Image (cartoon, rainbow, N blue to C red):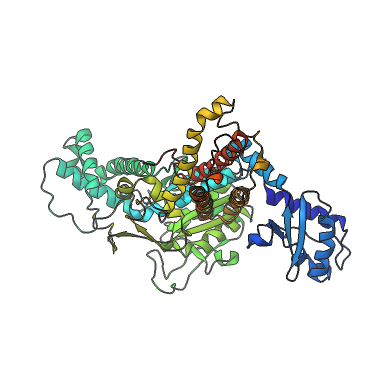
Amino acid sequence: MNIFADFTLRVKDALQELDLKDANGEAPDLSRVVVEAPRDPAHGDLATNAAMVLAKPLGMKPRDLAEQLVAKLNADPEITETTIAGPGFINLRVAQGVWHKVLGSVLDQGIRFGAQERSPAPKVNVEYVSANPTGPMHVGHIRGAVVGDALANILAFAGNDVVKEYYINDAGSQIDTLARSAFLRYREALGEDIGAIPAGLYPGDYLKPVGEKLKAEFGPSLASKEESEWLPLIKERAIAAMLELIRQDLAALGVEHEVFYSERTLHDRGSGNGSKIDHMLETLRNKGLIYEGTLPPPKGQVPDDWEDREQTLFRASDFGDDTDRALKKSDGSYTYFAADVAYFQDKFERGFSETIYVLGADHGGYAKRLQAVGKAISDGKTEVIVRFCQLVKLMRDGEPVKMSKRSGDFITLRDVVDEVGPDPVRFMMLFRKNDAPLDFDFKKVTEQSKDNPVFYVQYGHARCCSVLRQAADELKEAGYAVDDLAGADFTLLDDIGEQELIAKMAEWPKVVEAAAETHEPHRIAFYLHELASSLHGHWNKGYELPHLRFIQAGNLKLTLARLALVRAVSLVLASGLTILGVNAPEEMR
């Protein structure tokens, strides 16, 4: 049950009964009419903006319209009170039976409470991480990995057919550098003193196992070959080794992609019918969207692929981009951007109605160009969403932890996960909006206190499980089971703290819906913290007021009702934590 969607429909039905007409004699557009929780619970259980958003198109004063609407709403038996606030907002009080239905729905649907079913389910592609396969994941990749993974889970929970995808940048010059770096480690494995790692190569020790594997496979045979002979062989093996390392790193964080898409396949002409990039160029040419011309140098730092010569250009500025974009250089080679365009076309041809890119903040200029590509290739049929993740600063003992990928002396994803565990990493990466900088304090995320958000939420779930364990024997004697409490008498839940918990759980479907629509996973983390706070607050009252405790000796009916409430809270907490990829522990040690 989505109480907000339910009462939005009731408000719209009441408006239709009023048979209102605008200046053109037509019924008003009701799409902006919503029912939400009021900012101040003292004003009511629900609030609607109906009179405020419809007054102008109807040529009425908001308050006059509100009075007409209230007269209709008062006829609803589940609306017990209506009040008009300010210029025309309408606050509603609902019957207790409404909240009992919410509680019953949570118990009936379990962790699927709040999930949406859409038929047909829209196909959504979420691409995230997509780090160059040149080494292990470092801390700079963590936030994008967690945000992308949680966002994909939210969208799936909201009824979408979601594919989690990783784009492998395996066609650039960095792959040649990787192969040469691996070859150096191969020579080292053969017993050669390689000295200091030359500038421009990857110096990390993570390539030593690759060198050992090359020695085991080829013996010393590669050492005497020309680079043109050993480079393609080592490329394949080095890429495979790095991808396996990346998969392992991501798995430690609980991240698994369904598709690993190779950039090289976009360049491949093995079939003899041209590459996917060639196919993309033909598509844009047929639409009249590419031309031969020159571009002025960009402001600020000039990219490596900029040329002051005639190139093949995409009319990106016709679709909202700041400038047109080069697809083919003057020497006939493709730009990096050409592969990006061909990659989107491949996604479009796979039938995605929405494509989401989760990128680092250093890619801030990519949003407009990717959205321009989406409009041009799909004729506006596929929506392109770009979400940026700001930097994460690691803190230890009040001091920032420094890192440098190029030097080989950097903080890896596994360093962080192995020290604090995946749950604190995932939750804390989501407990702040993705486009805001984040300080990750190793001490704070591991301490067991209310100041640690992930502990606070997980402890809430564990507390619920503890109560249910304590009552297991009593439930069994009475013929009840923990997962069969829907028949309890919810009318006995008359304390304000109990009612607040039910009202907070009623918000869950709307929170899921909003997080999916806005592509903002942090909304889930914030909500879980609020629900856990309500639970802990009510729990703590029981220390001083024994009559509020969940288990009441000698009063089975009240105990059952309260256990039903506890069970429901545990289900919503477990549902939200699962979406975020965080465990919902039954015990905290």
Quadrant where the C terminus lies?
top left
Q: Position of residue 20 (x, y in %)?
A: 86, 61
User: Within the image, what quadrant is residue 173 found in?
Assistant: bottom left
Classify residue 234 as left or right of residue 554. left
Q: Which is nearer the eye, 372 or 513?
A: 513
Q: Position of residue 365 (x, y in %)?
A: 47, 65
Task: Give the residue drawn at x 24%, y 49%.
Answer: 180
Tell me if residue 574 can be seen: yes
Q: Position of residue 525 (x, y in %)?
A: 50, 52
Count of numbered tags: 0
Q: Which is nearer the eye, 137 or 462?
A: 462
Task: Give the residue drawn at x 47%, y 42%.
Answer: 463
Classify residue 425 as left or right of residue 514. left
Q: Is residue 558 above or below residue 511?
A: above
Q: Position of residue 325 (x, y in %)?
A: 50, 64
Tell me if residue 120 can be seen: no
User: Within the image, what quadrant is residue 187 found in?
Assistant: top left
Q: Which is nearer the eye, 561 or 47?
A: 561
Quadrant where the N terminus lies?
top right
Classify residue 523 as left or right of residue 195. right
